[in-house]
Amino acid sequence: MPKPQKSASDSLLLQADVLVLGGGPSAAWAAVAAAESGAKVVLADKGYLGTSGATAPSNTGTWCVPPGDNRHAVVERRWQRTGELADPRWMLRCVDTAYRNLLRLSEWGYPFPSEDDGRLYIANLRGPDYMRFMRRRVLLAGVTVLDHHPALELLSDGDAIVGAAGVARQIGQDWRVDANAVVLATGGCAFRERILGASGLTGDGYLMAAEAGASLSGMEFTGKYTLAPYGSSLNKGLPFRWASFHREDGTPIVGPTGEPLRNGIGDREEEVARALIDGPVYARLDQAEPALQGWLRQGQPNCFVPYDRAGIDPFGELFPITLRAEGTVRGTGGIDIVSDDCATGVPGLYVAGDAASREIMTGAVSGGGAVNSSWALASGWWAGKGASTHARRRTGKAFRSAVQSLGQAGLRPASSPRADISAGEVIEAVRNEVTPLDKNFFRTGEGLEKSGERLGSVWRDVRDHLQGEGLDRVRTREAASIAAAGRWSVAAALHRTESRGMHRRSDQPGKSAAFAHRLVITGVDAFRIAGAPERLAELVS
Amino acid sequence: MIEIVSATRCVECDICVKVCPANVFDATDNGVPVIARQEDCQTCFLCEIYCPTDALYVAEFAEGPTGITEAQADARQLFGSYARALGWKRGKAGGSEFDPTHRIRVAQ
Ligand SMILES: Cc1cc2nc3c(=O)[nH]c(=O)nc-3n(C[C@H](O)[C@H](O)[C@H](O)COP(=O)(O)OP(=O)(O)OC[C@H]3O[C@@H](n4cnc5c(N)ncnc54)[C@H](O)[C@@H]3O)c2cc1C
Ligand code: SF4
Ligand code: SF4
């Protein structure tokens, strides 16, 4: 285990082969995989490994496909639903690796439930239990875990990423980890929406990666929203599979066939979204039979916490609902992966889970409900292995003293800092463009253009003037990351002049063959958007 | 949001300070932790289930405090109710082996 040292500036200094940033499932799997290959691993999380991230408060279904020839057909069927942007090769290798890791969990003794025939049911992972279990596995693997150690920026020696720096927020001390490779497992960007697990999901990894020269893809696919009891954090759609929906005056909301909606999830979110733009919407889980009511209560207990605490019987009474924005968490955007070991194209920088673009896995549709958690299981593994292989190749190279700190916006403003530009106001301004249903669920070129202009001006203020001191740097950096993610998302959405999956352009309905490819964004302040084929050609040359 | 740290139940173990992913609590020198950054709470209910004495209460409204009092939450037996629903006890995990979610997925 690495020994902490105090440096002259009174900051915590560690050395590792592999540094993992994040504390969700993909970080945990990356840390275990790297440690198993013999690497000395440090994991630094903004929150607490075991409770932080999107999985810990939830109950995640995995995409669990047992080995066998049938899995080609399963992958092919799922691919049909991805808006042609996913890559079946990645999908296949993901289900294989995820399945192996689910088996590993059962070998380690994770308490899976059983089916009626007594076989373990390994396709579902209950968040609090799973992540608490993973914390123990990470510690057993000999990983040094730094809780409440948000990373603020990456470090480079000019050729490769050689670590990261941040602040230990419960101690009020800076930290730096020198490492031969870094895995970004910092999750998605939920644009500060108050949804389960999202307080720390501010897209920090995207900004850090982009500052290092990595690209992003799928950033236009942030049009995913999930139903929740009004005002609650419970963005879990499953119970609404068995619901009816009503307007203020009691009239039912109808589906495309004119029949009242009896299922509010998947494509039907669109009707609810339209109604919510007009006014309040109420739901009742009245399509659930008594047996199902019991399973829902027992299997998804947190879904019922809001009702029980507010004194509502959701099966019998109407209650107000909302659609919660989910940014890239249930969207698909993130850091672009360039090789099978989850490398980013920047030497020494690897990416896993929601921090990575899941376009190769799930294209233009949401990977929530199955694909994302399998992706965390698999990509964490590959990134951990990839990073430790890279670290081994670099062993022996002394850490150069001339290490560059790569953090810009929110840390080192381009011009003089201004106290009147606050993190909170920046985030509010971004939210105004990227969360309202009438701007982001249903999009138009004109609306996106206006949003783009406003976000451009927010970004210029952030870039030039936003700065924090001490612990406040966490907040200014989060605001900068949210501003960058919002700007990329709107720019990519404007670029994609068609509708595909969760990218719904009212002015461009229908898919266009000219856009049957991924859009890759490179750059932070001045960025360019290229189609994936062009980007590949660039990588080859 | 997190609203109540019950001083009568709390044993001052500071587990909540450590496990809250949003760093909402501050430990105090000689007493129960304080809710120092309520606005940062993500309403995930996880502090409740990690607390060994069911001393924490997170209200259902995520956008701001509801003002519920300890007496009201107590009268409605809300302390520890989420932990009980999961099968967690005294801050220890349990109950995932009885999760019937696979039945829901079949029904779906
Ligand atoms: C309510 C809900 C239900 C879901 N249900 C399902 C489901 O049923 N099936 C499914 O497949 N998927 C589901 N998902 C998606 C799934 O939870 C995510 O895909 C998964 O959690 C991603 O894992 P991750 O480790 O990449 O990111 P996360 O679990 O989100 O973890 C990200 C981590 O990064 C840390 N971090 C962020 N910034 C920094 C920083 N600057 N420095 C250090 N650490 C940082 C955070 O603290 C956090 O620990 C659900 C999501 C939600 C919100
Ligand atoms: S976890 Fe519970 S008992 Fe421990 S300090 Fe917090 S409130 Fe008190
Ligand atoms: S509900 Fe979650 S975020 Fe809020 S105080 Fe408890 S653990 Fe922290």
Image (cartoon, grey):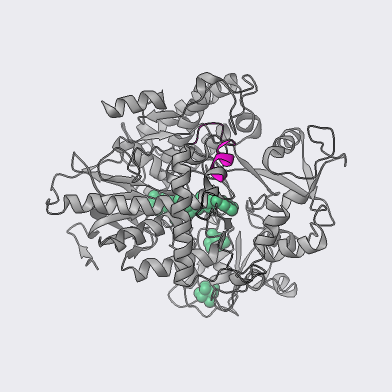
Q: How many marks?
A: 0
Image quadrant of residue A347? top left
Measured as percent of width and height from the top left, residue A94 is found at: 45, 48
A83 part of magenta stretch: yes
Direction front: furthest residue? A69
Residue pictured at 48% horizontal, 37% vertical = A359
Looking at the picture, tell me which residue is in the foreground, A267 or B55.
A267
Report the side of A16 relative to B6 (left or right). left
Residue pictured at 79% horizontal, 53% vertical = A285
Part of the protein shown in magenta: A74-86
Examine the rendered structure and indicate whether residue B98 appears above or below residue A464.
below
Quarter of the image containing the C terminus of chain A? top left
Direction right: furthest residue? A250
Quarter of the image containing the N terminus of chain A? bottom left
Measured as percent of width and height from the top left, residue A375 is found at: 47, 49
Examine the rendered structure and indicate whether residue A238 appears above or below residue A130.
above
Measured as percent of width and height from the top left, residue A117 is found at: 65, 70
Measured as percent of width and height from the top left, residue A526 is found at: 36, 25
Task: Kindly tell me whether residue A482 is visible in this rendering.
Answer: no
